[in-house]
Image (spheres, rainbow, N blue to C red):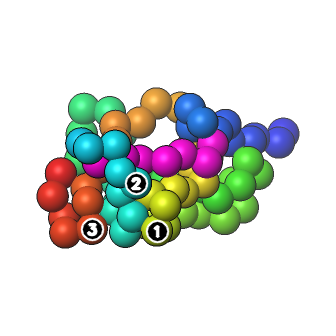
Amino acid sequence: MTVSANLLPNGKQQFLDGDGNPLGGGKVFFYVPGTTTPKDTWQDDAKASLNTNPVLLDANGEAIIFGDGVYRQVLQDAFGTT
């Protein structure tokens, strides 16, 4: 049986700060909803390549994130502010 991951809402996601600027260097933590238990995400739909947790955002505040199921996301800027 082949199990594939789904793109989290937009696949290549961009995260912005409160002023609408890209959150370059930010981090997105992924957890099982309602917990602080980390939950895996992947760089591809075949679940062959895990993302780090937290997922590190590039200079444009972007990352490709595939997931499986429901997640709780915590977003931090480059300085660790949630």
Q: Amino acid at mark 2?
A: Pro
Residue 75 relative to residue 81: left or right: right
Foreground pick, 22 / 30: 22
Which disc number belongs to residue 59? 1
Residue 75 relative to residue 54: left or right: left
Q: Sequence-wise, which precedes: disc 1 or disc 3? A: 1
Q: CA distance from mark 3 to mark 2?
A: 11 Å
Q: Sequence-wise, which precedes: disc 3 or disc 2? A: 2
Give the labeled residue for mark 2.
Answer: 22
Q: Residue at x 41, y 47 (%)?
A: 15
Depicted 52 relative to depicted 5: above or below: below
Foreground pick, 24 / 36: 24
Residue farthest to the left, as pictured: 81
Give the labeled residue for mark 3.
Answer: 78
Foreground pick, 49 / 74: 74
Q: Position of residue 78 (x, y in %)?
A: 27, 68
What range is drawn magenta here?
A: 11-17
Q: Residue at x 73, y 48 (%)?
A: 45
Q: Position of residue 25 (x, y in %)?
A: 37, 68
The reply to whether residue 61 is in sight is: yes
Mark 1 vs mark 3, foreground winner is: 1
Element marked by disc 1: loop
Residue 23 relative to residue 3: left or right: left
Q: Amino acid at mark 1?
A: Ala
Q: Are marks 2 and 1 in contact (CB under 8 Å)?
A: yes
Counting other residues with Cα less than 10 Å from the Cα at mark 2, is it few (<14), some (14-19), or many (20 or more)? some
Q: Quadrant of the N terminus?
A: top right
The reply to whether residue 68 is in sight is: no
Q: Is residue 13 magenta?
A: yes
